[in-house]
């Protein structure tokens, strides 16, 4: 009975806190404070099991401290969920080359340098996932014939009339216009690109026709950062 009474008092207190926007004292909005109520209710129910049988006073104090710590961690985690999400993206980008870490505060994306020294960028071109190599030496985005077909481009109807220099030597390319390129939260439409002949290139390139649309891009020792 005592536990039920305590639970009721806590629930009423939380309701009053929401009504008076008390959450603003710890950096939470009124809506965020309201969203915490179910979490608190769950913790109360779980903690109630600790008081279901008779325990020593010291044990009760230890359990109470433990649950207060769990509740505190849960509140902090909820409050900083977006920042923690950014940290998780950065960790994934480090261990998975090509993965994009999105910084929601400034609209930038970060890609870690791959083991071979290049920057492999996981992009979405016309709705299709495509891996590109960051290459400022390429005047435009360059797609392999295979990636172009995967993105829905009919390569059989293209005219390969533009001479291009690739890692495999001289080749010919066709000019196309891509509906969209998406990297993290950065999206661009109507990007000029080249499609090279079959066998001319092993990996598609992220060239200047996309990079010059960015507000900036910087290359450090281990990371590439692009800003929308």
Image: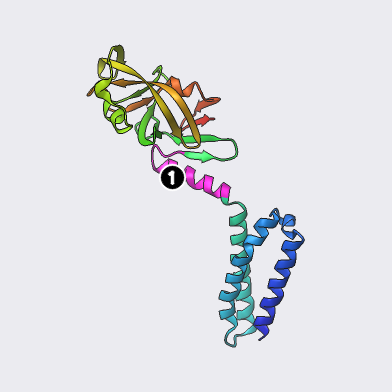
Give the x, y percent position of residue 47.
58, 75
Q: Is residue 219 left or right of residue 137?
A: right
Number of residues whose C-alpha sits closer than 10 Å to that of mark 1, classed few (under 14), some (14–19) or many (20 or more): some
* For residue 208, above or below residue 59: above
Give the x, y percent position of residue 42.
57, 70
Give the x, y percent position of residue 177.
39, 22
Residue 117 in view of the camera: no
Q: Quadrant of residue 172?
A: top left
* For residue 98, above or below residue 161: below
Toward the viewer: 60 or 194? 194
| Residue, far bottom | 54
Q: Secondary structure at mark 1?
A: helix
| Residue, far front | 157
Badge 1 is on which residue? 92
* For residue 110, above or below residue 56: above
Q: Is residue 224 left or right of residue 46?
A: left
Give the x, y percent position of residue 210.
45, 24
For the stretch drawn in magenta, the main secondary structure is helix
Magenta-highlighted residues? 82-100
**From the image, which quarter does the C terminus lie in?**
top right
* For residue 180, above or below residue 14: above
Q: Is residue 62 left or right of residue 91?
A: right
Toward the viewer: 155 or 77? 155
Q: Residue at x 47, y 23 (%)?
A: 211
């Amino acid at each position: 009975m005592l536990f039920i009474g305590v639970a009721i008092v806590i629930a009423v207190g939380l309701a009053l806190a929401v009504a008076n926007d008390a959450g603003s004292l710890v950096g939470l909005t009124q809506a965020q404070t309201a969203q915490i109520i179910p979490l608190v209710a769950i913790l109360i129910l779980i903690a109630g099991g600790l008081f279901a049988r008779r325990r020593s006073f010291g044990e009760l104090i230890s359990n109470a401290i433990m649950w207060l710590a769990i509740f505190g961690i849960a509140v902090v985690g909820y409050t900083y969920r977006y920042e923690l999400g950014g940290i998780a993206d950065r960790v994934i980008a480090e261990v998975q080359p090509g993965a994009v870490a999105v910084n929601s505060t400034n609209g930038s994306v970060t890609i870690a340098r791959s083991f071979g020294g290049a920057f492999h960028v996981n992009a979405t071109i016309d709705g299709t996932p495509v891996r590109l190599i960051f290459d400022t030496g390429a005047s435009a985005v360059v797609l392999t014939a295979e990636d172009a077909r995967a993105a829905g481009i009919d390569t059989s109807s293209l005219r390969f009339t533009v001479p291009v220099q690739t890692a495999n030597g001289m080749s010919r390319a066709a000019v196309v216009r891509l509906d969209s390129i998406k990297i993290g939260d950065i999206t661009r439409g109507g990007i000029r690109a080249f499609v090279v002949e079959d066998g001319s290139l092993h990996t598609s390139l992220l060239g200047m026709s996309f990079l010059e649309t960015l507000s900036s891009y910087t290359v450090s020792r281990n990371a590439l950062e692009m800003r929308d």
